[in-house]
Amino acid sequence: MRAMILERAGERLRQVDWPTPKARAGQLLIHVSACAVCRTDLHIIDGELTHPKLPLIPGHEIVGKVTALGEGVKRFRIGDRVGVPWLGWTCGECGYCQKGQENLCDQAKFTGYTLAGGYAEYTVADQRFCFPIPASCSDTEAAPLLCAGLIGYRSLVKTGNAKRLGIYGFGAAAHIVAQVAKYQQREIYAFTRPGDDTAKKFAMNLGAVWAGGSNELPPVKLDAAIIFAPAGELVPQALKAIGKGGTVVCGGIHMSDIPSFPYSILWEERSICSVANLTRRDGEEFMALAPKIPVRTEVQTFALAEANEALIQLRSGKIQGAAVLVTD
């Protein structure tokens, strides 16, 4: 099969002819039709997330059809359309797993990081961590739901019932979360790269009541803010934007160092929290909710062989919505 592999951090991906995997007990063999390109992929390729399983096939927002079943598979049949997310396996036995916090499992394995991912024509995945794809979504539209959507949804849940919601970094996750937040009748305040008028317009078209640069303060105090941009300097900026009792949620897997800030902007019961990975419950809830809204993802497609170009455009902020690799 064709695959794009990472051989060493900091290098470009290389297209190779790779052995097609076989489904082991409990696994699905999936013919990949689409795999979204995530900023986490950049963090892995750049070496900011250490200890990937090299050589690595990246990609963890996978949509495809089941072509073979491993022994004991009961949840899916050959021909089913499924999605594969970042969280690919957990032990099920540790304290975190037992408490319903499988996203924090110390033994967890991750698609496209410690497990082979979806920048290829085929992949295998544990049936327990795969999700049926809503019929209302095409393969390319569905792919960003598997991480941008799921992590965005988990981040949104962390904000509780916040009415006035700030979103910093208006990319793949933000453009999905904005649709969910609007459906929940929240007010969206979008923060983009300073001077990025295209992103501001994109946010307003998705229902934001205000859009400005990330160096600006909104016209009103916010109840909560979600930061998707991997920029630590946005944490004190977001703290200044929220009101008393508000929460700043850091939705990324990696962020640059947070600069020191005065206690006064944290005081009055403001809080900061992070989001780590996802749970299967997150996936089940979000995949049931998405078609009701309905969530519509904006995507730019690239051929599998163009993965490096997709990553370059994502890094430079040229992608509006989400980049998606297609195998056909």
Image (cartoon, helix red, strand yellow):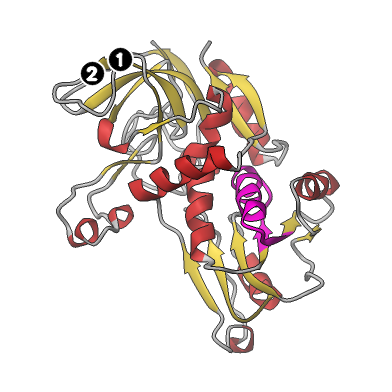
Magenta span of residues? 166-189
Tell me which residue sits at (74%, 46%) in the image.
206
Is 35 drawn above or below residue 214 in the view shown?
A: above
On screen, residue 83 versus residue 235, left or right, reads left
Label 1, secondary structure: give it.
Answer: loop
Tell me which residue sits at (46%, 41%) in the image.
288
Tell me which residue sits at (58%, 83%) in the image.
266
Name the kind of residue labelled 1 in the image.
Answer: Ile
Tell me which residue sits at (63%, 55%) in the image.
181
Q: Badge 2 is on which residue?
A: 69
Quarter where residue 137 is shown: top right
Lower position in the chain sequence, tag 2 or tag 1: 2
Q: Is 171 a magenta residue?
A: yes
Instruction: Tell me, for residue 162, which label it has, or none.
Output: none
Q: Badge 1 is on which residue?
A: 78
- Evaluate if marks 2 and 1 touch, with contact meaning CB atoms under 8 Å apart: yes
Residue 8, percent from left and from top:
42, 33
Disc 2 packing (10 Å; few <14; some 14–19; many ≥20): many
Residue 1, percent from left and from top:
38, 10
Is 27 drawn above or below residue 256 in the view shown?
A: above
Residue 233 visible in the displayed image: no
Is 85 drawn above or below residue 161 in the view shown?
A: above
